[in-house]
Image: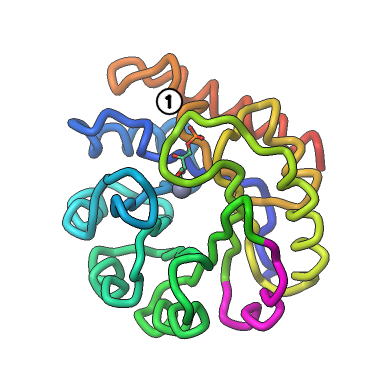
Amino acid sequence: MTSFDRSIKIAPSILSADFADFGREIQAIEAQGADWVHVDVMDGHFVPNLTFGPPLCKAIRPHIKTVMDVHLMISPVDTYIDAFADAGADVITAHLEAGPHIHRTLQAIRGAGCKAGLAINPGTGIDGIEYLLDQLDLICVMTVNPGFGGQKFIHSQIDKVRALRALIGDRPIHIEIDGGITPETAPLMAAAGADVLVAGSAVFKGGSVNNPAPYGENIRAIRSAAEAAR
Ligand code: DX5
Ligand code: ZN
């Protein structure tokens, strides 16, 4: 029996990549050690920013050798699940705040053949999540208000992660952290129980497709800080 993988995984957000060159950016971050590729989908309604949809996901899918981790910051969600599944998403994460029927949404994500993730905003508590645990493969704790990269980490979320980790117990559910992750903040979340660390600006800073070594240095700095805190 193989045990559930709770090792630290770094998931660069392509929100901080060069939008004119996603294919090569993805190849670069994977070559530099990324474990997952995090794709931030925004609708200009659930969050005050617009990014991209299923056609872009489909276009970049062949460049991803690891895991395509699609974070939907959209409302409604259900009408788009099949399109993101068809585009090749491995994980589809929907927000608890995106609609009244999150249980149905999570069922639909698994029904479409994907791993189901639940994201919760900084202002949302974890009451009631116990009733969703059987439908979940991942919980994404937002450590910024969703919508933009490069924001400051919200420290009050550390206690939330600790409580979630206790609630999850031995269940095969990842805890992902999204927003403001750096070598300074990653250890706080690793110590509290997180295993998937999304990072946009802290991974892409200082590098480019023609100079990808800084991506690797940034990924290694986040990973080693997080691993040392466990
Ligand atoms: C925020 C997105 C994040 C964001 C992370 O709405 O969900 O994935 O891009 O970016 P940084 O690491 O720059 O906070
Ligand atoms: Zn995200």
Q: Which residue is mark 1?
A: 204
In the image: residue 186, left or right of residue 170: left
146 above or below 121?
A: above
Residue closer to the observer: 81 or 111: 81
Colour setting: rainbow
Q: Is mark 1 within 8 Å of ligand 1?
A: no
Q: Is residue 23 magenta?
A: no
Part of the protein shown in magenta: 125-136
**Residue at x-position 52% and y-position 82%:** 103
**Residue at x-position 47% and y-position 46%:** 146
Disc 1 packing (10 Å; few <14; some 14–19; many ≥20): many
Q: How many marks?
A: 1
Image quarter (top left, top right, bottom left or bottom right) of the N terminus: bottom right
**Residue at x-position 48% and y-position 29%:** 150
191 above or below 165?
A: above
Looking at the image, can residue 10 be seen? Answer: no
28 above or below 91?
A: above
Looking at the image, can residue 130 be seen? Answer: yes
In the image: residue 6, left or right of residue 69: right
Image quarter (top left, top right, bottom left or bottom right) of the C terminus: top right
Q: Position of residue 136 (x, y in %)?
A: 58, 74
